């Protein structure tokens, strides 16, 4: 019985190390979210840090700042959703039946 417990603890530690490595690798990956047919692009890392925002000059209208704000929000949400998908893809293999949101 004790041998089984030791073996299980080794497996848990190995899985934890693999998961930490996968989380670190996520920081090196990035995704882009876009809005308005690509006039606003937001780049987010796999750990959900914004690394870049690009706004094409043709979308800037001083008389319609609200539209630009909406486009930035939409691009951010698109990028964050893609970052979630990337994290779920990379870390989901460790979930092995755990309830969503545990990782």
Image (cartoon, grey):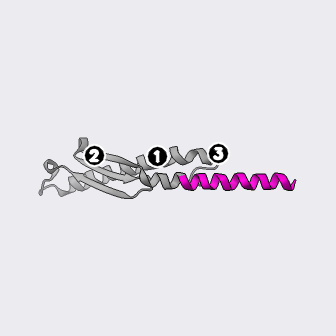
Image x and y of residue 79, in percent: 37, 49
Q: Is residue 10 magenta?
A: yes
- Please name the residue shown 36% across and 51% down the image: 77
User: Residue 63 placed where, x, y %?
Assistant: 12, 56
Residue 70 locus on image (x, y percent): 26, 53
Q: Which residue is mark 1?
A: 86
- Asked if residue 51 lies in the magenta stretch, the reply is no
Which residue sits at x=56%, y=53%? 101
Residue sitting at x 26%, y 51%:
71
Residue underneath mark 3: 96
- Crowding around mark 3 (Cα neighbors within 10 Å: few <14, some 14 to 19, many 20+) is few
Mainly helix, strand or loop, the magenta region? helix
Query: Of marks 1 and 3, which one's residue comes earlier in the chain?
Result: 1
Q: Nearer the viewer, residue 6 or 37?
A: 6
Q: Does the residue at mark 3 contact the one at mark 2 (Cβ under 8 Å)?
A: no
Q: Which residues are magenta?
A: 1-21
Of mark 3 and mark 2, the one earlier in the sequence is 2
| Cα distance in 3D space between marks 1 and 3 | 17 Å
Label 2: which residue?
35
Taking depth in this image into account, of 81 and 29 the one nearest to the observer is 29
Q: Are marks 1 and 3 in contact (CB under 8 Å)?
A: no
């Amino acid at each position: 019985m004790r041998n089984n417990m030791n073996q299980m603890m080794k497996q848990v530690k190995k899985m934890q190390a693999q998961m930490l490595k996968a989380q670190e690798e996520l920081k090196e990956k990035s995704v882009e979210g876009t809005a308005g047919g690509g006039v606003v692009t937001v780049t987010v890392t796999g750990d959900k840090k914004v690394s870049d925002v690009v706004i094409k000059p043709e979308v800037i209208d001083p008389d319609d700042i609200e539209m630009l704000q909406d486009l930035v929000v939409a691009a951010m949400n698109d990028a964050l959703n893609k970052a979630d998908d990337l994290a779920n893809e990379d870390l989901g293999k460790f979930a092995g039946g755990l309830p969503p949101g545990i990782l």
